[in-house]
Image: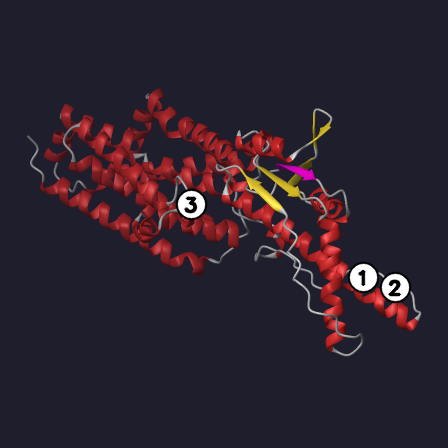
Amino acid sequence: MKVLATINKEFLLLIRDPGGLTLIFLMPLALVVVMALIQDNTFRGWQETKIEVLLVDEDHGFLGAALERTFRTSPNIRAVKEIDGKPLTVEEARLLVRSGKYKTAVIVPKRASGDLQKKTKKAVNRLLAHYGFTEKQPVTKELPSVNLQILFDPAIKPNYKQTLVSAVEKMAAKVQSDEFMDEVQKYLSKTTQKPKISMDLSEMINVSQEIAVENENRGMALNAVQHNVPAWSMFAMFFILFPLAGNLIKEREEGSMLRLRLISGSQLPVIAGKFFFYLFVCFLQLFSMVCVGLYGMPLLGLDKLILGSNYSGIIFTGLAVAMAATGYGLLIAVYFKTPQQALSFGSISVVILAAVGGVWVPVFVMPEIMQSISPYSPLNWGLTAFNDLFLRNASTTVILPELVKLVIFSIATLTASIFISKTRTVS
């Protein structure tokens, strides 16, 4: 009966506290939406982000045309050849990139196509002469390489830079192979009287990309919604210590706890009642955040939260995180004597645990020293389990080590709370 009475009392205290209800439910919902919107472009990276590239073609040959075709077919690059209807010059491109108006420029120098043809012809003649198909040519000075120049804004992101360089290098490799094959066929067509054929060597090897997940989640990857919904849900659950600690310390200051201690019998039911009530509140928080991820985020133009198929694993993980959050809140509430001490230490400690655990940013982008510390945060245990469930569709067996750590953390904090509550002298 004490447990039910405590649960009823905590329920009445909570519904009579509009500020507490806002802190527990509305603030986390607003926080997860804002963070998902802020981080959306960061997580999308190059999936949907376009970069404008200034293209200065001083050659006006096949090399510049091939580069323009490459940019036109790239989903992430848009070539800009004119400003205000006038073709760009090298000096104008340098100025625009240096000023930060454009992030990069590609310059195709004069006579680039002709120099490439000469260099290719010389290489083919050398090859054919080596195998006795033609007479050896006199040794001449090696022709310089054709130099395609790329200008970068100093503030450009490394992934933008890598994407552009890769596109240019891919185009260069294709043009070189095409020119080489064309030059070889010119000789063969003369000796065999057979016409040239069209060959695209770039299509001989195809590189496909795929996320290693189950068929129903094909194409799934970490994005702003998949990260922020479970991350900030746990953050909100750990902030349950605010109403929990506030109510418990207030009872102690008003003498309610003293009257309960004077009643014969164990105080364990009182602690248990608080624990089970706030455990249920944490579950409501998680449920509301998941609903926002499923139905609210798509309305804002964000991705829909994908839960995977292991719903029982999600329930077990939510229960384990709720137990850890409630146990930690109880420990803070019984250890500190004033609301100021409890709430100050509690809020700062939760923020630190969240930052270390990968709530603010994913662990893999942290410095190495932080990555080594992260596995000691209970929020990291929960986030790892949620990522395994949502992104990898993992079985409950896979996430079991993380659940065990959360449960042990909960039992340890709850045991410490009961011990402190029994031994502390009430003044």
- Residue type at numbered disc 2: Lys
Figure label count? 3
Q: Quadrant of residue 359?
A: top left
C-alpha gap between disc 3 and disc 1: 50 Å
Q: What element does badge 3 sit on? A: loop
Q: Nearer the viewer, mark 3 or mark 1?
A: 1
Which residue is depicted at the point 12% across and 35% down?
Answer: 261
C-alpha gap between disc 3 and disc 2: 55 Å
Residue 217 located left or right of residue 5: right
Please give the residue where the numbered disc 3 appears in the rendered image. Answer: 362
Q: Magenta segment: does it hold 237?
A: no
Magenta highlight range: 51-57
Which residue is depicted at the point 31% across and 48% down?
Answer: 377
Residue 416 visible in this rendered orientation of the protein: yes
Q: What element does badge 1 sit on? A: helix
In x, y percent, where is residue 322?
35, 43
Q: Is residue 204 above or below residue 291?
A: below
Is there a contact, CB below 8 Å, between mark 1 and mark 2?
yes
Residue 423 located left or right of residue 271: left
Q: Which mark is residue 182?
A: 1
C-alpha gap between disc 1 and disc 2: 8 Å
